[in-house]
Amino acid sequence: CDGFVVMSRAVLQDLDKFDKIRPRRFSPHPLYDNFGAATSKSLAKKNLGLDESSKYILFFGFIREYKGLDLLIKAFADERFRKLPVKLLIAGEFYVDGKPYLDLIESLGLKEEIILRTEFIENKDIVNYFCASDIVAQPYKDATQSGVTQIAYHFDKPMLTTNVGGLSEMVPDGKVGFVVAPDVNEISKALLRFFNENKEEEFSANAAIEKKRFSWEILLNQIEAVFDQCKSEDEN
């Protein structure tokens, strides 16, 4: 490589471990804004066949071990959720053996509280999953950054993320969502606070402002800047 563009400051630090000389720029992952305009929550729930009286925590994307779905399921088993009209919506294909997750749901008595849509989600349906949800949960055990964050931003959705990799750089804690340790108790406490303190409207409004720093133009400018620096160094 002649130069580097990284999408999180955590990766920028990793880069220093093997190269401190070649040009590099940091540019956050741009928005995934190709899934159409937002629709109303009511219509999105209707399109998905969901109970319109319930609120939803969305876990979205391919299910892999590092994404911490098991932590989220265990957190959702907190009895305090049973006093709220809240369900967990899991949307995405299993890319690992799904049996341990299904067994966990069964053992915790959550079959009626969790909606499983564990199949490939077509692009045309993504708008419904995000617009039907109240908060998007990313309980990752390990990460650099995540495209799910940028879909959530596109639809002005509050988020819960963990403080691993570059995730916390993307979601200002207490402003757009909550950033917690990848810990069952911390995850459940933050989600309960979100619903009990009615944070959706506040966080959603802040997401609409915060997402302006994730434009494709910024990324293109940084790529050009690295290219120009590489070209200048070659000429010298």
Image (cartoon, helix red, strand yellow):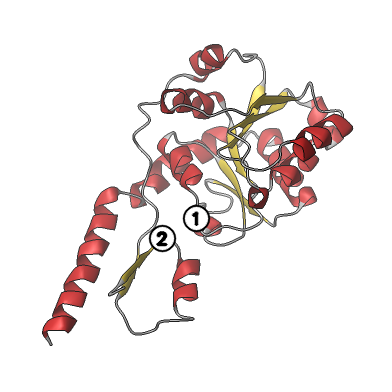
**Quadrant location, the C terminus:** bottom left
Q: Residue farthest to the front?
A: 97
**Residue plotted at (35% across, 27% down):** 36
| Left or right placement of residue 232 versus residue 130 in this view | left
Image height of 194 relative to 178, above or below? above
Q: Nearer the viewer, residue 219 or 160?
A: 219
Residue 164 percent across, percent down from the top left: 61, 60
Q: Residue farthest to the bottom?
A: 236
| Left or right placement of residue 68 versus residue 28 in this view | right
Residue 87 percent across, percent down from the top left: 70, 26
Name the quadrant containing residue 199.
Answer: top right
Q: CA distance from mark 1 to mark 2?
A: 7 Å
The reply to whether the C-beta atoms of the residues labelled 1 and 2 are less than 8 Å apart is yes
Quickly name the residue at label 1. 145
Image height of 35 relative to 138, above or below? above
Residue 168 percent across, percent down from the top left: 55, 57
Residue 31 is marked as none
Helix, strand or loop at mark 1: loop
Residue 217 percent across, percent down from the top left: 24, 51
**Quadrant location, the N terminus:** bottom left
Q: Residues within 10 Å of mark 2 (few under 14, many from 20)?
A: some
Quickly name the residue at label 2. 7
What is the three-letter code of the residue carrying label 2? Met
What is the three-letter code of the residue carrying label 1? Gln
